[in-house]
Amino acid sequence: MTGIDKINNDFVSLFREGRSWMEAGCGPEVNAFREDAFSKFLALGGIPFKTEDYLYMDLLPVFGKDYKVVLKYIPQDVNVKEVFRCAVPELATDLLLTVNGWYFKENEKADVPEGVVICSFQEASLKYPELFAAHYNQYAPAAVKDGLVSLNTAFAQDGVFVYIPEGVNLKRPLQIVNLLRAKADLMAYQRNMIILEKGAEATLLVCDHTLSENYFLMNNVTEIYVGEGAHLDYYQVQNQHLGASQINSLFVSEQRNAVFESNMVTLYGGMIRNNQYVALNEEGGECHLYGIYILDKSQKVDNFSYIDHIAPHCTSNEHFKGVLDDSSLANFSGCIRVEPDAQKTEAYQANNNLLLTDSARVNAKPQLIIDADDVKCSHGATVGQIDEEAMFYLRSRGISLAEARMMMMFGFAHDIVQRVKLEPLRVKIDDLIDKRLRGEFSKCHNCLMQCKK
């Protein structure tokens, strides 16, 4: 039996034996999809292996570890004020924790306008069945080729649910801190739903961290609905240790004149796969995807995006940058699809990478699929090293080699970070990137962990 066959067979046994645990506490809208989703996972060959979308990312070493799987809520003794705090000075947020994929039951109630719902994924499936059913698993099936998304639908039990009614502006950013903490190697699943009705506005900051030295594998799926004229700014900061791997899939459905803007900041972690699928369903929609990844040692980061222009008069911008050191590996695959009726589309995509060693590697695959004739679209990718002429200019003005190198790398990365609209967050990310580029494994404020992996 090959390694991939054993892994897939183990999932079959886990799904059959753990079905009752997974269904307990979840509403029928969640449980009704499990069997079909797991069948799709198997029909697609199980764990992706040498498939087109995962061509440069070998998942077998990650999935082949002997993980424990979280199938029920286990209370965690986490005091966010004493043990861990993802703090950004001068940025006031409403803070939520998840631990190992489960909504932390001791979360303080957020001070939000009337009608806003912030609760656990499980609770929402039971208390708001009609609202939940209208959106759950409606956008993720777009990725029918990705068995890992189906695997999440089969196993997921909890996560974060956010509902913002029509015309409501969530003035304080909502911060979700996803913690991984265990006494054994652990595999976890998390499912999130974010719903913005017509004219709603919100800012969401997601921080991914580890609080113990074990190996982790997180399979996380987030479905987002951005209603007519609604606006969502989405930021995600990934800062875990080298033993933590993550499959992070984001699905966004935009309606007329909606705006979705995301910024993915990858600072540290083992193997990370970020999937972003955006559907511009109605006229006037805007989508802006930005990302920066700072890699060294044996880090592996794979950014995959698919922007589907379905309606006319929509705009999308995508720009990802990477700085790679040591033997790190980055993959970028971005596809912009312009459907036949999506006339007057404007879509732009770029991926730029800076290699600091001969052993660092990048695979870039920008793509355009255009089935309309009245559009403005462009795409491109670059891979290079530090500009020697710019380095000579800095050195000739008395700047040391190390500092000149730092200035070049920081300026390269800051082009993406400057798009963060929240100034305190932008300053904090700049500080974290500066420390990462100097070789410091920097966690956020007051983290007591001193991770070695």
Image (tube, helix red, strand yellow):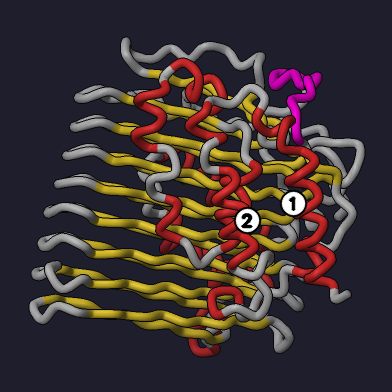
Question: Is residue 307 one of those drawn in magenta?
Answer: no
Give x and y (percent) for residue 418: 40, 54
Q: CA distance from mark 1 to mark 2?
A: 8 Å
Give x and y (percent) for residue 171: 33, 24
Q: Amino acid at mark 2?
A: Ile
Determine the residue positioned at 39% across, 32% down. 133
Determine the residue positioned at 37% across, 37% down. 135
All told, the count of numbered labels is: 2
Q: Nearer the viewer, residue 234 or 74?
A: 74
The residue tagged 1 is 217
Crowd band around label 2 with a 10 angstrom C-alpha radius: few (<14), some (14–19), many (20+): some
Q: Nearer the viewer, residue 436 or 95?
A: 95
Q: Is residue 88 visible?
A: no
Magenta segment boundaries in residue numbering: 71-82
Q: Nearer the viewer, residue 300 or 145?
A: 145
Q: Amino acid at mark 1?
A: Leu
Would residue 284 be found to the left or right of residue 148 on screen?
A: left
Determine the residue positioned at 53% across, 28% down. 121
Task: Tell me whether circle 1 and circle 2 mark residues in contact (CB < 8 Å).
Answer: yes
Is 113 rendered above or below residue 39?
above
Determine the residue positioned at 65% across, 30% down. 23
Q: Is residue 35 visible?
A: yes
The residue tagged 2 is 247
Give x and y (percent) for residue 53: 54, 75
Q: Nearer the viewer, residue 218 or 331?
A: 218
**Quarter of the figure with residue 60:** bottom right
Is 63 rendered above or below residue 19?
below
Main SS category, magenta section: loop
Would residue 38 be found to the left or right of residue 336 on screen?
A: right
Sequence-earlier tag: 1 or 2: 1
